[in-house]
Image (tube, grey):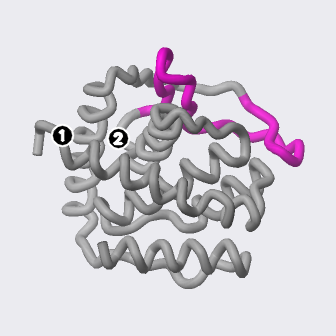
Amino acid sequence: MHRVGRAWLRLTQAFETGRLKSRVHACKSWRNERKLRDQLYDRLMHVVTDLGIKVHTQQEFEPVKDFYGQVWTPAGQWTGLRQGIRIRGEGDFALLAHEFAHGIDEMLINVKHGAHAELVASCASYLFCIEYFGRGNLAHALHYPTQSWGATVEDFRKLEDYIIDVYRQMTILFAMDSKN
């Protein structure tokens, strides 16, 4: 939990200052890192499917416009508890964690939309990746909801407690997985 506490502090500082500090990098060999990432992906996939969430792989997504009118192509999409998750390819633990965070948001019946949904999912999945993988992409957690969806520092402050709640629910469900 100490590692996640430091990650939360970095995330809070990044939102408040609008700047990223140097990236924390776990010292693991790339082979061990890839093996761990694959194991975590398989385990998270098991958790997600045990919850009844379908995961569909898709080769291409339609380009979308962000908050500022920029066109980009998403790598994944949360389509609701009934339809599940759509992701491009397989094996991306961080992407699956991000979409899983959207699912937890919906399960908590506190569904956020637009900028708030992406802010919650990005930050909660960042903490989740730090907890289990040993590192996360702080730049994604900061830039994706702010630059693509228009989230603000005020939104972050307002949602801090809820982000932690979503992260905790993710870790509880992951820890309860029968494949432990």
Does residue 149 lie above or below 157 as drawn? above
Which amino acid, mark 2? Gly
Which residue position holds label 1?
Answer: 177
Percent x, y of residue 106: 52, 33
> Residue placed farthest to the right in the image?
69
In magenta stretch: residue 71: yes
Does residue 12 lie above or below 115 as drawn? below
In magenta stretch: residue 102: no
What segment is highlighted magenta in the picture? 63-89
Q: Nearer the viewer, residue 88 or 80?
A: 80
Category of crowding for the residue at label 1, using alpha-carbon neighbours closer than 10 angstroms: few (below 14), some (14–19), many (at least 20): some
Residue drawn at (34%, 76%) of the image = 3
Quarter of the figure with residue 28: bottom left
**Is residue 20 left or right of 178 when viewed as pictured?**
right
Which amino acid, mark 1? Asp
Quarter of the figure with residue 64: top right
Category of crowding for the residue at label 2, using alpha-carbon neighbours closer than 10 angstroms: few (below 14), some (14–19), many (at least 20): some
* SS for dot 2: loop
Does residue 96 lie above or below 18 as drawn? above
Which residue position holds label 2?
Answer: 91
Quarter the N terminus occupies: bottom left
Residue drawn at (39%, 20%) of the image = 54
* SS for dot 1: loop
Quarter of the figure with residue 74: top right
Percent x, y of residue 32: 19, 62
**Is residue 1 left or right of 166 when viewed as pictured?**
left
Percent x, y of residue 23: 50, 78
Query: Of callouts 1 and 2, which one flags the residue occurring earlier in the amino acid sequence?
Result: 2
Quarter the C terminus occupies: top left
**Is residue 17 left or right of 47 when viewed as pictured?**
right
> Residue placed farthest to the top in the image?
82
